[in-house]
Image: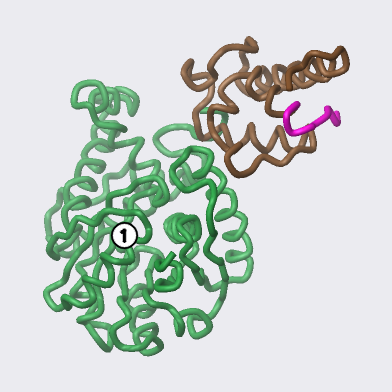
Chain colours: A green, B brown
Amino acid sequence: MGADAQHRLAVLGAGTMGTGIATLAVGRGVPVTLVDVDEGIVVEARTTVARQLRLARLLGVLPREGVEGELITAVRLADAVGVATAVVESVTEQTQLKLDVLSEVSGLVSPGTPLLSNTSAIPIDELAGATARPQDVLGVHFMNPPYMITTLEVIRGPRTSEAALDKTMSLLDALGRTGVVVGDGPGFVINRVLQRMINEAARIVQDGIATPEAVDALFTGCLGHHSGPLATADLIGLDNVADSLRVLLDRTGDEGYLPCDLLVEKVRAGEWGVKTGRGFFEHGGTR
Amino acid sequence: MTASTPALQERGEAVRRNLMSFLERRTKHPVAADVDLFATGLVSSLFALELVIHLEQSFGVTVAGTDLTLDNFRTVDAMTALVLRLGGDDRE
């Protein structure tokens, strides 16, 4: 009950992750303002959130009864973040775009409002540097889909305050999530390992050593992974995988993070995975 | 309430036929009324939302609250029982 009154979320960016985070929040009774730059996008996002909310309830991962958080959509940051108790930045994985958005938003919220970036790989301290109050900035790396996966990576930057971390953990508690707190660095923990693994798996397919089905069958069958690296890549979105790999390459200089030709080709062809219906695998239909 | 009267039985048959033909069209396989659609892998649990929408649009029912559970969509028989319980009729 108290959680409903305490928390009010602003989510910036109504893409795959932004709409998923909004679904989680409203399903847990936390009001959300979801912002994107285009009226058409936010109208579509309302439909997406409603659909995801039903799916989540059907699957039993969000409460079937109880108070729903209000969903408001907006196309201007200024209309959205003033009353928020926390802001989740979930715009496209491009550094300058994220820096611009975080810089603008930090001028609009009251001091002490946690600014949470859902970046896949950009170091939190780099993003914090663009804001008026770096102590309020931290990383909250939701997994896709956010309304189904209950554990997430919380990144504490070198300048993040204890107060901001406490407020964030309280929000995650209201959302029914468990945050694992880790330190800062390109890709943090998950993506430093996972993106490299996806790139290598794609290179294996590119070199004709194995089919996508064979690669994934080894990881699921032999290692007990819930899904193989290429199915995971399709779920994340190959566009985002390529963007994250470039972030990691730029900051580590490690050529292993250079997106392989097959991955680049798929992104160029619009084969981005689940969100476009085709990536390493075909999607849609009944399975 | 059970489908005991001839009228109810007839409505149940119509719902069952509709669902079986919808599933056959989508999965490209004939589907028996009592087969567990998820356990057999004929459809994924994500497809269940399409089943919800199909039920609502075809029979004029609204599935909400505690009815929104996978168990109600596990078999053609379970979906038929749900439609009858919610007072739906075949609109096609």
Residue B38: x and y in percent read 50, 22
Rendered view: A262 above or below B20: below
Closer to us: A107 or A150: A150
* Residue A133 covered by magenta stretch: no
Q: Name the quarter where the C terminus of chain B is drawn.
A: top right
Residue type highlighted by circle 1: Asp
Q: Report if residue B90 lies within the magenta region.
A: yes
Instruction: Looking at this view, name the residue that lies furthest to the right.
Output: B7
Residue B68 in the figure: left or right of residue A257: right
Is residue A169 visible from the viewing direction of this image?
A: yes
| B21 or B86, nearer to the observer | B86
Please give the name of the residue rendered at 32% of the width and 53% of the height, measured from the top-left corner: A242
Judged from this view, the residue extending furthest toward the front is B1
The image quarter in which residue A260 lies: top left
Region rendered in magenta: B84-92
Residue at point 57%, 32% (across, down): B48
What residue appears at the point 21 percent right and 71 percent down from the top-left corner? A165
Residue A91 picture quarter: bottom left
Counting every numbered tag in the picture gives 1
Q: Position of residue B26 (x, y in %)?
A: 64, 24
Q: Position of residue A212 (x, y in %)?
A: 33, 28
Q: Residue at x 71, y 32 (%)?
A: B55
Left or right relative to A220: residue A76: right
Work out whether B92 lies above or below A156.
Answer: above
Residues A122 and B65: in front is B65
Q: Main secondary structure of the magenta part?
A: loop
Q: Which residue in the protein does label 1 denote?
A: A173
Q: Position of residue A267 (x, y in %)?
A: 41, 49
Q: In which quadrant will I find the N terminus of chain B?
A: top right
